[in-house]
Image (spheres, grey):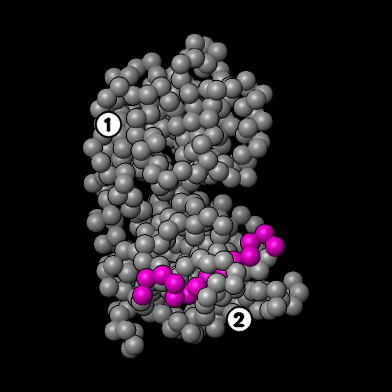
Amino acid sequence: MQNEKTGKKHIAMYIGSLQKGGAERVMVNLADFFFESGYQVTLVTTYLAAEEYEVKHAAWKRVPAGADNAVLVADTEENPAWVDPEGGEKDGIKRVFSALLKSEQQGRIKNLSLRHRKLEEIWKELDPDLILSFIGKNNIMALSTATKEGYKVVVSVRADPDMEYDTTALKAGMLSTFGKAAGIVVQSKGARAKFPRFIQKKCIILPNAINPSFIRKRFMGEREKRIVMVGRLDENKNQAMVMEAFAELKKEGYKDYKLIIYGDGPDRLKLQRLSAELRLDESLEFKGNVSHVAEHIEKAAIYVLASSQEGMPNSLIEAMSLGLPCISTDCPCGGPADLITNGVNGLLVPIKDKDAMKAAIKKLLDDREYADKLGKNATAVQDLYNPEATYIQWKNYFDMLMN
């Protein structure tokens, strides 16, 4: 089916915002890929975040209040946001916002109904051939507002289903709506296995593509004495456990090494206080969000992922693509275990096990030849997760559903 006006198949992609996170990055990459492949693409987001990924072919542009053609898309005190809908690339990827403005709100209970109605009106206005939704509550909203009008909806669970649907209300919403999905994209066999059988039948495992900037020849020089982590600063990512393990290693003589943490999030102040308590001083650096991550980490001695729960972690795929010796926790859904064969192309340790993490780091610091072997073997992920191989799987799946 093709859009009568453009002659192109139209895909609407729905997510909360394009703020810097793993799921948001995947959606932005998919939007650019499908647009460049000749599809009409519209991004539907709840709001405009303060700091977002760049969409290469964006038809819109963030503008200050009072600018020509400025449209108010959010008017909360924390995030007043204005956009020029036509200020970017001509006939590029359009963007629609589903948040209620203050003038549209009528109280907490009524607002839920109004948000549903606004989303229903957006689908009718866009009339897409397929809707792709990412993450938790968004998936429930997309299915409950679009499928009754006959629109095909593919939902994607980006993490451990137990984490995305972690309340009674969310789980009930998921169970009552997922049966209406045209398809359900998950990240690992472990994630699929957590759903009831009637949902498993609709699941497909589609991989994340490696950002092209991480596909390069492996750095072969002497590695810098840095242990690196990349990710949101929150309890799930468990940077605190790695900090504690690192502090103990420093007391045991590994004083020349530094722990460098990239990313930002709600636990930043708490982690900074912990750093002071552990007296890590200049041995630990919080770099915040940075551009061109590959250039920052490719020469590091070790990459560490310490999450309690993960889907298919982009940052681990990227670190392996660069050929870093990698250590990851063995998360319940099996995302890291789908990537790492323990002792062959990386090391897996139990979640929340500081002593096991410490032992793994020590092993790689003590045996550089072994660490180098793991790093070399890790680069094989480039063959499995390069954009050309990955996106064609998404494209074939979507074309099958749309046809």
Secondary structure state at the residue bearing disc 1: loop
Mark 1 belongs to which amino acid? Phe
Image: magenta residue range: 77-90
Q: Residue drawn at (31%, 63%), measured in percent from left and top?
A: 33
179 drawn magenta: no
| Camera-nearest residue between 306 and 231 | 231
User: Real-space Cα distance between discs 1 and 2?
Assistant: 53 Å
Q: Residue drawn at (29%, 19%), measured in percent from left and top?
A: 369
Q: Position of residue 70 (x, y in %)?
A: 55, 74
- Residue 272's disc number: none
Q: Position of residue 160 (x, y in %)?
A: 50, 51
Whether residue 372 appears in this view of the structure is: yes
Q: Position of residue 127 (x, y in %)?
A: 43, 83
Secondary structure state at the residue bearing disc 2: helix
Q: Specify the quadrant that holds the N terminus.
A: bottom left
79 drawn magenta: yes
Q: Which residue is mark 1?
A: 219
